[in-house]
Image: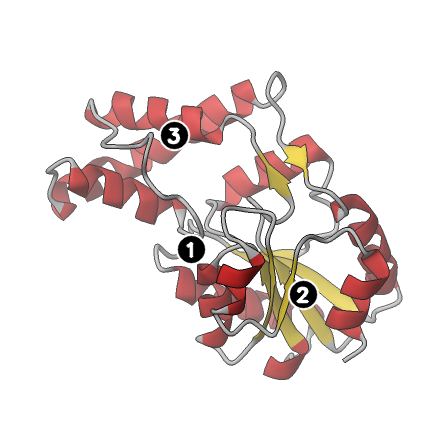
Amino acid sequence: MHTLLLFDIDGTLVSGGPAKQAFHIALLEAFGMAGEIEVHDFSGKTDPQIARELLSGAGLSHPEIDARLSHVFDRYLTELEARLPAEPVRILPGVELLLEALTEKAHREEVALGLVTGNVARGADLKLRSAGLREPFVVGGFGSDSEERNDLPRIALDRARDHWGTEFAAERVWVIGDTPRDVTCAQAHGLRSLAVATGNFTQQQLAHTGADVVLADLVDTQRVVQQLVAR
């Protein structure tokens, strides 16, 4: 086991689903407002960061937000779980075959699979289970661990070390995501990054981040595996 692959979720593995609606309802119930949620940029941010930006933009102070933030996520997760059966997330092209190939390598102890996502942990679990993609991912760093996206790779690395008993070398750890923030959080820890243009950013925009690899999508399984594992 020498390579650790840390995947983002939204825009990388899946898209769509009822998360935004569930988040909107939760903010309204907890605070009576949701800020400018319809036009707010969610890309690459943690769930707590998004909530704080929306609410502070609507005039609330940080102490006021902190006082009821846990209620937001309790309500959000309840609403998300209730809505997912009727409005499941959509698996992005190539993802299923890629994860099948990587899971085989994980069984042979060639790679380890985890997550680095701004979703709170339970939200990540619900989304991936609704798509049938939860099982391959053993560890992760989540928005419920830290509001700061750049903190999450280190948390995932610590959990990977504890789980597999391996100190993964930085050059053998990849963050795979669809936003500049995914690339930045990898760079903050000296990790490698693969940026995929299946979210809200083009290949050209992602190339400007300095990502190690930039792809249009994850459809070419052999190519993606070679990029991540054969180096």
Answer few, some or many: residues within 10 Å of disc 1's Cα (few below 14, many 20 plus, some between 14 and 19): some
**Label 2 vs label 1, nearer the camera:** 2
150 w.r.t. 68: above or below: below
Residue occupying the point 50% across, 52% down: 201
Q: Amino acid at mark 1?
A: Asp
Front position among marks 1 and 3: 3
Mark yes or no: residue 231 visible: yes
**Res 181 → quadrant:** bottom left
CA distance for labels 1 and 3? 18 Å
Residue 109's image quarter?
A: bottom right
In the rendered structure, the answer to whether residue 85 lies left or right of residue 56 reads right
Neighbour class for label 2 at 10 Å: few (<14), some, many (≥20)? many
Q: Tell me where residue 100 appears, x and y as whole percent.
A: 84, 51
The label shown at residue 145 is 1
Q: Earlier in the sequence, mark 2 or mark 1?
A: 2
Mark 2 falls on what kind of element?
A: strand
Q: Residue at x 25, y 32 (%)?
A: 36
Q: Which mark is residue 5?
A: 2
Q: What colour scheme has been applied to the protein in the rendered image?
A: secondary structure
Relative image position of residue 110 (x, y in whole percent): 83, 71
Tag 3, which secondary structure? helix
Q: Earlier in the sequence, mark 1 or mark 3?
A: 3
Label 2 and label 1: CA atoms lie apart by: 19 Å
Q: Is residue 67 above or below residue 77?
A: below
Q: Amino acid at mark 3?
A: Phe
Quadrant containing the C terminus is: bottom right
Q: Which residue is mark 3?
A: 23
Earlier residue among tags 3 and 2? 2
Q: Amino acid at mark 2?
A: Leu
